[in-house]
Amino acid sequence: MRKKMHLGRRHFLRNSVLGLIGSGMATQSGWTREKESRRLDGRQAEDTAQPRIKGFRTLGRTGFKVSDLAIGYVQDESLMAAMLDAGMNYIDTGESYPGAHQKIGKVIKERDRKSIFLTSKMLMEGDTTKEGLIKRVRKALQELDTEYIDCMMMHMPEKAETIKHEGFHAAMKELKTEGRIHFVGISNHGSFWFRDPEETMEKVLMAAAEDGRFDVFLLAYNFLQMDQSERVLETCQKKNIGTSLMKSTPVTKYYILKSRLDQLEKEGKDIHPLYKEGLTRFKDKFDRAEQFIAKYDLKNPEEIRAAAIKFVLSNPRVNTVCCSLQTFDEMERIIPLSGSKLSVQDKAKLAAYREGCGELYCRHACGVCEPQCPHGVPVNTIMRYFHYFMAQGREREAMLNYSAIPGNKANVCGECPGYCEKACPYNVGIQGLLLLAHNQLTLA
């Protein structure tokens, strides 16, 4: 019974009309039909029928010409290969992504290694001595089956002071001397817990820019979330730091929230009154947003996603945008956006969506509400894991990470009058989202 319920929920998550676009199983397309013909006699076959990357930008001081659209978290090896075939040459991964190194290693094995810019990331936890970090990089190299990593990143440092970690920089210096890594980078999309509201993504990355030892930044930036990123991007341009983006296509989760509530009611499970109230508040926001959706003809969510990608590509301070795709059809819609710019019509649609639907999106790396939570719930982290679960197909990883959160989780939100919602500067119905996140991430 539990398995059937889980599969049903996965089916819904992967087919929500407005919530999560294209998050399904890899579907057959021109790419899969021509998969066997792409390699002839060990050489790459020409494939002029399929869309290709048209835009390339210099990745800051690295000097590498990267594709404007890059490979983010991709689980399917054949899909990743097709993305490389289409001209994407920047790959983002991390040691904490289950099995990702090994899959990438297989895909790039027969390719010109110098044509690919490969980045990986390390969390500053566990063994962070110089020796320990060097050992971790050597393990990553072995898993990737490559002689070098183009850029090794410090992954999500909690505080600005962490960027000066002596063991990390000593390890990176030695590995650069050996030629095992070429550049050093940093990623950030908010701390685990924002009890100290000053430790923001902007503060951490601005400190890294001032430090001067980081060559590439990976940060969150989209048309609904610009305030913490604009200054960072401007500084990167001035200091010739490469920039790569994540979380550039924010989407609404209303349909998933409502569907889960309907499922719980159908199963006859007890639902806390505040859960229903949270949904009601969220639904009120969505009902108002629907007026804008109708007025500006925003019914096709793919148009919004395309416009969102054009928005970030139109910023000359952005070098590449990581795309975490899961289907070939999705890839075929994304790649033609390479080299494109935001049109007047696109700007109007995004402005309407921002005004009408902005309250449906919990901003990544925000954390403004967390200091107001009397229970110490790490809102930013929980919503990140929820994003992994729904948008990226990383369900098992998200659930394990959620279970490992120390202290209170979103289960305590059902007994709260909603301090987070009252503190949110964007008026997001976050309490309902947190309760749904707990429900999904625990399979309750």
Image (cartoon, rainbow, N blue to C red):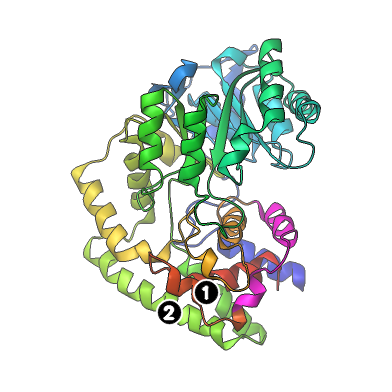
Q: Does residue 322 appear left or right of residue 342 in this picture?
A: right
Q: Which mark is residue 281?
A: 2
Could you say where residue 56 lies in the image, as x and y percent from the top left? 40, 22
Magenta region: which residues?
A: 394-413
Q: Mark yes or no: residue 419 visible.
A: yes
* Quadrant hosting residue 440: bottom right
The amino acid pointed to by label 1 is Gly
CA distance for labels 1 and 2: 8 Å
Task: Determine whether 376 is above or below 331 in the image.
Answer: below
Could you say where residue 325 lies in the image, as x and y percent from the top left? 53, 43
Task: Determine whether 441 is above or below 105 in the image.
Answer: below
Of 107 and 44, nearer the camera is 107
Quarter of the image where the C terminus is located: bottom right
Could you say where residue 323 lies in the image, as x and y percent from the top left? 50, 39
Q: Does residue 349 appear left or right of residue 325 in this picture?
A: left
- Find disc 1 in the rendering and name its residue: 432
Q: Main secondary structure of the magenta part?
A: helix
Which element is circle 1 on? Answer: helix
